[in-house]
Amino acid sequence: MMSQKPDILERLDISILWGHYEITVLRFHLTSFPPGKIIDFHNHAEFEFHFIPKGKGKVILGEQEYALAEGMLYLTGPGVMHYQEANCEEAMDEFCLHIDIKEKPRDGADPWEVAEAEECVGKLRHLPLFPIRDRYHAMDCFLEAYEAYDGKLSGYYTSIKHQVISILLKAVRAYDLGGIVTEAPVRDMLNYRYHFAIQYMKANISSGVTLDTVAEKLNISSRQLQRVFKKVNPEQTFSRILEDIRLQGVCHKLSESVLSIEHIAQSEGFANATYLHNVFRKRLGMTPAVYRKENSIK
């Protein structure tokens, strides 16, 4: 696919803020080595990621020679001398990503993103100098970035930046045998369930919300949901909060609309105007009609 426009991605000026780093993309392309092609010893001032999507050959990293075959990757960091050669009988393609990484501390950065960026960049600086299988399919990121840009898909620039970060992470994972050091944030499930339940109740107030229906949406039992409400807000039961939400809706419509009280009652989950009248008087000390008279927006 990329052979049609092998350097199309290099036309973009890509700079990515990740944690406390700025990652600048210098080169982002597909290159092809004809059979027997040699690139003599050289090095770069930046990181270069090499992926072999097709063909075979060899690379010398430092003083050690390694065979290259389809599906392999290797990384050359700043100052690493390397030599590349395609097989004398078979061409070799290579996806290349050159990036410059500079520290750029910034306020307000997500602390978990900062930790993961720090971990990834630290590992990139110490990756071993030998090729390895592209176990996490980082090569696919080149194709996805190409498709996004060539097709001018919605949000293609943001998508390409995400693909660049994915290449870094997947390359590190391919070498990583030590597991995760930085763990992502974990939800407080108690508060998450409580606030999700409140949100769902507000969004579906006119459709007969019950303890069972809300519990079902959270994939927990009704008894578990009752415990959630009791632990987060011991002073208010599920029923009381549901009634509060309904009354808030009623008050809003009484003051801002000319809908009948019967219509308002049913739209906010009350059986009828009579039941609303009784609840309203008990909770607010007045009837819905009096509330409308005192609070109507002229």
Image (cartoon, rainbow, N blue to C red):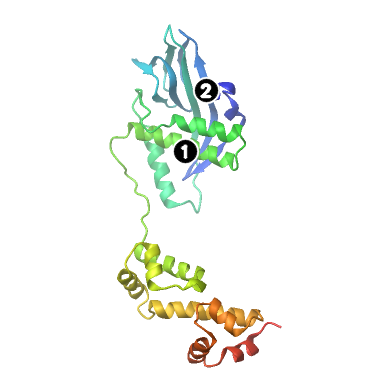
Assign a secondary structure to mark 1. Answer: helix
> Looking at numbered disc 2 in the image, what kind of residue is underneath it?
Leu
Q: Residues within 10 Å of mark 2 (few under 14, many from 20)?
A: many
The mark that comes first in sequence, 2 or 1, is 2
Q: In x, y percent, where is residue 210?
A: 41, 73
Q: Nearer the viewer, residue 81 or 36?
A: 36
> Looking at numbered disc 1 in the image, what kind of residue is underneath it?
Ile
Q: Quadrant of residue 152?
A: top right
Residue at the (54%, 40%) spot, across then down: 159
Which mark is nearer the camera, 2 or 1?
2
Q: Residues within 10 Å of mark 1 (few under 14, many from 20)?
A: some
Q: Is residue 107 above or below residue 96?
A: below
Q: In x, y percent, where is residue 88?
A: 43, 6
Q: In x, y percent, where is residue 26?
A: 55, 29
Q: In x, y percent, where is residue 80?
A: 41, 22
Q: Nearer the viewer, residue 266 or 8?
A: 266
Left or right of residue 62: residue 101: right
Q: Nearer the viewer, residue 139 or 108?
A: 139
Q: Which residue is mark 1?
A: 165
The circle drawn on residue 30 is: 2
Q: Is residue 6 above or below residue 280?
A: above
Q: Quadrant where the C terminus lies?
A: bottom right
Q: Is residue 155 above or below residue 212?
A: above
Residue at the (53%, 28%) spot, across then down: 28
Q: CA distance from mark 2 to mark 1?
A: 18 Å
Q: Is residue 44 visible?
A: no
Q: Quadrant of residue 85?
A: top left
Q: Nearer the viewer, residue 218 or 22?
A: 218
Q: Is residue 243 above or below residue 15?
A: below
Residue at the extreme right of the image, as rendered: 298
